Amino acid sequence: MDILYRHAAIADGQRDHLLLDQSILVVDETIEWMGHDDEAEEPGSDVRVVDAGGATVVPGMVDAHSHSVLPGGSHWIARIDDSTEELLRVAEENGEIAHRAGTRWFRDVGSPPRDGKALALRVRDEWAGRRDRPYIRAAGTWISKAGVLPSTIDVEAADADELVAAVEEQASHGTDLIKLYLDGPDREVSPWTADEVARAVTAADAHGLKVTAHATVLPGAQAAVRGGVDCIEHGSHLDAELAAEMAERGTFVVPTLGVLDSWESFGATTNIERFAGHDGKVAIAARKELAYESMRLAADAGVRIAAGTDFGGGSLRANQMAWEVECLVDAGLTPFQALAAATWVGGDLLREPNAGRLVVGGPAEFFMVHGNPLEDPSALWRVWKTA
Ligand SMILES: [Zn+2]
């Protein structure tokens, strides 16, 4: 049925102020018309009118760092070994709760291989065309230097030839992007040189795929950026020089700051030593300070920042994008910049022109909250409904 939403405010992430007294006409799940209430045509009897008075329309969010088939929580790493059947159940729950919380896109940056292929690829294909699930764009499995991650969850390469072969293999599975793991067995040294990363980027490019790099330490981030990756995941240690280089090259970063905040929360909700013990708390505080400082440097340099929860591959849950937006504001982004990061900047990262945007002629993918997310990111928790 066609729907006319009336009397709404709009926070579209494109401008720094709310539009008031707005109407949106949705026909066949497409935005047919948007504008001031006074200019809306009188709806026919076949149009359902929804009084959205007091609510704010926000474009569907892009979770730019997610792990669709994994649950998160304080045992997030152990859960990667759960049965395929259980992980597929978890994916359905993730899709349902994320969708209800306003997330319409998962940029999936790693899932464990099951039956020879990354499991998220199967979920992506099953959800394609479903209106009640986020769209998935998936990286396949993590590609790492041998000896860094447990070998049941990743694809391992011992040298640059094997690295290129691993890229080719993931591309042959139909992935949408390639994920490299740029933390090495020795955290002071990048596992791959910039030239080796560049070989992987060239191999992916031949298949039309972008490469992104997990990098929590500076040497890996430097090699990744100089090797020409599209995006740095986490970027928990950047310096001003690298931030300037990223801005110049157009390299994105997805900071996932909420992970560190959630670890802090586990200090109260668990007895796990690395969260609740004194040394653990000190270590988390230090990592958090460095990560937040790195994002301030990135923002000041003009690096494109997209928001992602790291749900599943980290400890957040699939419906907690609002938490990450709050963390970005804590790190120094304006609420306007943080809302852009959670919506259309993630769309740009995916090269999906309608993702995270309200566009006449585009899909009606938005949700409604109470409050003004351009001044207060916590408004994003107060979801009324999704379109
Ligand atoms: Zn992750």
Image (cartoon, helix red, strand yellow):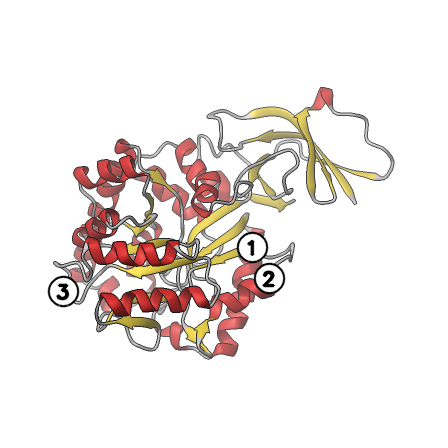
Residue 181 located left or right of residue 239: right
Determine which quarter of the picture holds residue 183.
bottom left
Residue 300, percent across and down?
Answer: 26, 32
Residue 178, percent across and down?
Answer: 38, 59
Cα distance between the residues tagged 2 and 3: 39 Å
The residue depicted at 64 percent of the width and 43 percent of the height is 363
- Which quadrant holds the C terminus? top right
Asked whether residue 352 appears in the rendered view, the answer is yes
Other-residue count near label 1 (Cα within 10 Å), few / some / many at <14 / 14–19 / ≥20: many
Comparing labels 3 and 1, the label whose residue is closer to the camera: 3
Q: Are marks 2 and 1 in contact (CB under 8 Å)?
A: yes
- Residue 14: mark: none
Residue type at mark 1: give it: Pro
Residue 267, percent across and down?
Answer: 28, 60
SS at mark 1?
loop
- Residue 186: mark: 3
The residue under label 1 is 134
The residue depicted at 43 percent of the width and 57 percent of the height is 207
SS at mark 2?
helix
Considering only vertical position in the picture, is 26 above or below 63? above
Farthest residue to the left: give it. 188
Residue type at mark 3: give it: Asp
Residue type at mark 2: give it: Trp
Cα distance between the residues tagged 2 and 1: 8 Å
- Residue 127: mark: 2
